[in-house]
Image (cartoon, grey):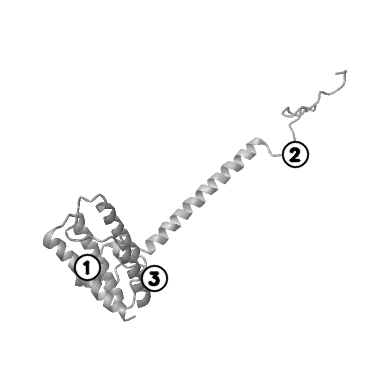
């Protein structure tokens, strides 16, 4: 290299700055960091606001204790079946017509595991069947509206409540009269529903 020539700039090597002055044409590193901090704080604030709004919406759709208020028809159904309505079996869906309620009930009841008397509580699939039955009842309740056409809507609520009570009896390993009473009530309401749905 002869005197007076500048060394070449290789990839990865900083550009030569013979003037000794700070480079121009772009923001300083401190400014970049400030922008990043501001954007991060703004993002956190947006997330917090969204969470608060979501909680407010959920609370407006629920009662004071977070549970959905029971419809009048459901309360009368529970009284007639002699059992309180568990929240998970409360009608809360959108199906209102007799045809839609009967169709949903038929599909769901066919998928619920059957428990015969006497029940084999030691069967390896007993607990799985119990959980599956509860899940199907919850799914049906989530589809049928509390304002479903009477008398099929209230009867469906009765059936769900009675079936839930029957599953509770199974979880206690009920036998004898306890089992027969619970299963008999479920069968009786199911027969009533079948009669209603045949006239659709």
Identify the secondary structure beneath mark 1.
helix
- The residue identified by callout 2 is 25
Tell me how many marks there are.
Answer: 3
Identify the secondary structure beneath mark 3.
loop
Mark 2: give few (<14), some (14-19) or many (20+) Cα within 10 Å.
few
Give the CA distance from mark 3 to mark 2: 62 Å
In the rendered image, the quadrant that contains the N terminus is top right
Query: In screen coordinates, is 25 left or right of 40?
Result: right
Which corner quadrant of the image does residue 151 belong to? bottom left
In the rendered image, the quadrant that contains the C terminus is bottom left
**Image location (x, y in percent) of residue 123:** 23, 51
Residue occupying the point 75% across, 36% down:
24
* Residue mark closest to the camera, 1 vs 3: 1
Mark 3: give few (<14), some (14-19) or many (20+) Cα within 10 Å.
some
Q: Which of marks 1 and 3 is nearer the N terminus?
A: 3
- The residue identified by callout 3 is 94
């Amino acid at each position: 290299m002869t005197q007076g020539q500048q060394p070449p700039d290789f990839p990865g090597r900083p550009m030569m700055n013979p003037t000794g002055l700070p480079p121009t044409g772009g923001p300083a590193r401190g400014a970049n960091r400030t922008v990043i901090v501001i954007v991060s704080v703004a993002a956190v604030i947006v997330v917090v606001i969204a969470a608060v709004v979501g909680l407010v919406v959920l609370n407006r759709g629920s009662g004071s204790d977070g549970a959905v208020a029971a419809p009048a028809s459901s309360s009368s159904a529970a009284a007639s079946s002699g059992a309180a309505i568990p929240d998970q079996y409360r009608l809360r869906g959108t199906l209102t017509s007799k045809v839609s309620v009967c169709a949903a009930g038929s599909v769901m009841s066919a998928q619920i595991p059957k428990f015969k008397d006497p029940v084999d509580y030691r069967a390896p699939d007993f607990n799985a069947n119990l959980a599956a039955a509860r899940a199907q009842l919850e799914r049906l309740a989530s589809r049928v509206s509390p304002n479903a056409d009477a008398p099929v809507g209230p009867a469906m609520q009765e059936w769900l409540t009675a079936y839930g009570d029957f599953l509770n009896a199974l979880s206690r390993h009920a036998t004898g009269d306890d089992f027969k009473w619970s299963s008999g009530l479920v069968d009786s309401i199911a027969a009533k529903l079948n009669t209603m749905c045949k006239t659709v």
